[in-house]
Amino acid sequence: DQQVKQNSPSLSVQEGRISILNCDYTNSMFDYFLWYKKYPAEGPTFLISISSIKDKNEDGRFTVFLNKSAKHLSLHIVPSQPGDSAVYFCALRSYNTDKLIFGTGTRLQVFP
Amino acid sequence: GAGVSQSPSNKVTEKGKDVELRCDPISGHTALYWYRQRLGQGLEFLIYFQGNSAPDKSGLPSDRFSAERTGESVSTLTIQRTQQEDSAVYLCASSAGSMSSYGYTFGSGTRLTVV
């Protein structure tokens, strides 16, 4: 039973356009929602997070949206750059624990 | 150190052998986590250490897997009698704990191949 799903295994976007990565979850017991980025042969790196009391958090080109009623999380990257090409994982944390549950990842390719 | 260090970076082992993977977390990080990523799959939680509390072992896939941590420093993940399905990248991460909103810092992982 996959609690966290990223239904698009891959996404291809032209440089300068918006990239939208999606993540759906089934459990309401999450209080923090994070996005990680992973390049080949490296560990994932933290990108941006949002707490359950907010519905939007912005950091430069990256914005995370949370829709709790729909149990849906998204990451917007605008404008997309070739260096953004990587695998993106959403990660969710349950209340009263530091353990993160990760999605399956979406491979983003930004082409010139 | 400046980041999370894992060793070895690559390990090829024969089926049935035992392997030991090492993780050096960021100094001062009280929480340490092990995840693995099998080919084409997401990150799978294995085990979590927080300070002196009993570790959360709920993600260990079988009794062939075990992990220990010395105080708030080095951790080793041991896989006994390795099987081909154990082939994966094993990732270690650490965090300052106390529900840091900045997430974990991951190491580069150990790629384990069981032949």
Image (cartoon, grey):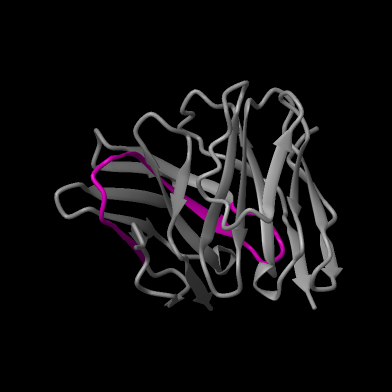
Residue under the point 51% across and 75% down: A109
Looking at the image, residue A90 sits to the left or right of residue A43; the answer is left
Locate residue B18: give its quadrant: bottom right
Of residues B31 and B104, the one drawn nearer to the viewer in this rendering: B31
Residue A111: x, y in percent? Answer: 52, 78
Q: Is residue B39 left or right of residue A90?
A: right
Residue A25 rendering spot, x and y as whole percentages: 29, 56
Residue A33 or B74: which is nearer the viewer? B74
Q: Magenta segment: does it hold B56? A: no
x%, y% of residue B54? 57, 28
Quadrant in which residue A42 is drawn: bottom right
Give the answer, above or below, for where B34 lies relative to B111. above
Residue lying at 59% horizontally and 64% vertically, measured from the top left: A83
Q: Most prominent secondary structure in the magenta stretch?
A: strand
Q: Is residue A77 left or right of residue B29?
A: left
Which residue is painted at 64% across and 43% down in the image?
A: B93
Residue A30 place in picture, x, y as percent = 31, 41
Judge whether B91 appears above or below A15 on screen: above
Picture quarter with the N terminus of chain A: bottom left
* Figure label count: 0
Which residues fall within the magenta stretch?
A19-44
